[in-house]
Image: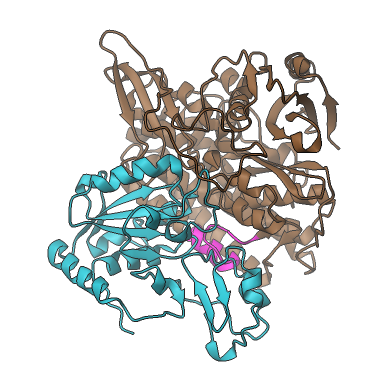
Chain colours: A cyan, B brown
Amino acid sequence: MFDRTRCDLNGACAQVCPVGAIAVAASFALDRARCISCSRCIEVCPTGALAQGLAFAVPERTRRALVEPPPAPLAAKGQELATRARRVLGRSLHVRHLDAGSCNGCDWEINATTNAVHDIQRFGVDFVASPRHADVLLVTGTVTHNLEIAARRTYDAMSEPRLVVAVGACASSGSPYPSGYASGEGAASILPIDVFVPGCPPRPEAIIEGLLLAVGRIVRVR
Amino acid sequence: MIETQSVAADALPDTCAALVQERRARLVVMTGTDERERGRGFGLYYVFALPSGALVSIEAQIDPARPEFPSVTRVVPAAHWYEREVKDLLGIEPRGHPDPRRLVLHDDWPHGLHPLRKDFDGRRTVARDPHPHGPITGVRGDGVIEVPVGPIHAGIIEPGHFRFGGVGELVFQLEARLFYTHRGIEKAAEGASVERVLFLAERICGACSLSNAVAYSQAIEAIADRHPGRRTRLIRSVLLELERLYNHVGDIANLCAGAALQLAVYQGGVLKERLQELNAEVAGHRYLFGVACPGGVRRDLDAAAQARIRRETGAIESEFRSYVDALLQTESFMERLVGTGVLEHDLADELGAVGVAARASGVARDVRASQPYAGLRPGMVTPVLRTEGDVRARMLVRVDEAFASFGLVNDLLRELAEVAPTELVTPIGPLPPDRWALGMVESPRGENVHHVMTGAAGEITRYRVRSASYNWALVPFAVAGNLLPDFPLINKSFELCYACLDR
């Protein structure tokens, strides 16, 4: 949670951030796609502008919209896509999970969306065994080079219309793994992403919200 | 103190074999290093544990002009994967290794490039060979079929490629191609700050995050010779048992998925969910990220949190008891587990099995008993043992360990209530140069070993993580001779993390 009125732009948060998610110049900007919720920034903030929030980080349609405070209203294109997706897919949604090199945390949280407590099936959402059957690809992980071919082939196997939802910090931005000989820079570097779900890992509710946002069952008003 | 013996590379097999035979030592980890910048060669560190828990390190320097050494694997089979890793990542050839194929690097990786050499820039991307030759040897013969599975699987699980060879449903051989989620964590740790490496350690594996964070922290504390206080250590142990609980309970529930017992999948899933919500409530994170740090912990467990843990674990324990009773009485389920996926005792012992898989085959390895750490005192944990080595045995080990953990949490909380609140973190300060230490933690899957080394300026120069998921090397042995449809059951009974192994 960020309180603009208390922020004096001292930059202590940016210095302590281990993943470079905070930039402080003329204003404060938090890139939630990189944030791993370690709360070091909250601990060092001398003005109390940063505080622990109760809500989980909210999924967004664009990578840019994950930079807090949000720079622009919902892109018209995203809304168009949502409308089209809803027209084609109706209220039911078949999801294929793709682990593209995660720590397995996001994947366990995706699993938890199917348990009797979170029960994602009450929204008409189901997980399928093959990308051939899927409307949505739910991608976790930084996209390791060892999985790049498999990830591309999984996406290619899906028929149109298809959506991609990136789950977690490393799928959204590659953070906190260093890109290089083994790790890539997240799912957006090889696939067109329709919704980013930030968090490390995001809670099951956030993943469910991201899926519903992707098919236009949630409309954001700003 | 760790007893060290420096030997010539040629003496490695004899020295290691003698240690195993004469002092009943077992190989805990083998780490290769590139010390050429320091005017030395490549280093090999074979670290063994004696029955007393004491560690012995057999060390050899390898001439960089002739990067090879006689393989220890033929006399100490547990060395087999370590030596293949050293060959891939450092380009040091284990001469006479029975299986010198690639392990960590995939076949499209170019020849002659070794990521853990100091002159390899880990931040660069490497062009892959578009036409690699596979390492799968396969099975041939009349009526033999091969079933390729993965790397992307049908369920919500991690990636790995399996090649089953057999006749009809009977599997003769399983070859596993792993390391798809290799993220280069060990390389990224080199030269990084102590805190930066902590964030990576926590994210080696989501489901063993706290075990890895504590093992890393213990290694750093041993190097710095700064140790956290009693309260901090007790908090670590309480939360480590909560990590074991949500994993063990969840793993038993997921085992039911391997036998299509859906009701039990959902019932167990609710218990796991409650344990994870308890984690979030008392420690701020469902997977216990951000809890441990070198020098201590970042969150206290106050009286309210302690009471909450006692109440909730007590309620879950009694529900878990009736859940397990119902499972044990479901003959159509239990019958699938008996005699399935047997891991023989001698194989488990010699190939260095750890954790649940070792104990279910009668091999008593539990770091909590052999090298008590954090808030544990000697004698607080007795390894749960079974001898059958099948899927049922691995399930029952988890059941008994879960009940033991419920009790242990209560014992630890009772001690915690008597220790006054103190500073939670002992400052570590700069690390001294040229030291190394191991941090060892019994994760839900078994022994996790973090080997941290410092360089001339006290920087982290090598970070080697050997998690319990090294047990992957054993799975093909337990699968051979079983039916293909039983593989999901066998796989889930080992319940190893790919992320933990691949790093």
Image quarter where the N terminus of chain B lies is top right
The residue positioned farthest toward the left in the image shown: A87
Given residues B113 and B190, the one toward you in this image is B113
Q: Which residue is located at x 36 percent, y 14 percent?
A: B139
- B69 vs B128, left or right, is right
Q: Is residue B234 above or below residue B162?
A: below
Per the rendered image, the range of residues in magenta is B274-291
Given residues B424 and B450, the one toward you in this image is B450
Q: Which residue is located at x 77 percent, y 42 percent?
A: B437
The residue positioned farthest toward the top in the image shown: B142
**In the picture, residue B501 is in which quadrant?**
top right
Q: Which residue is located at x 50 percent, y 61 percent?
A: A200
Given residues B75 and B93, the one toward you in this image is B93
Q: Is residue A100 magenta?
A: no
Residue B179 image position (x, y, % from top left): 49, 36
**In the picture, residue B292 is in which quadrant?**
bottom right
Q: Is residue B403 visible?
A: yes
- A95 vs B390, left or right, is left
Q: Is residue B334 visible?
A: no
Label count reads: 0
Residue A99 image position (x, y, % from top left): 40, 48
The residue positioned farthest toward the bottom in the image shown: A5
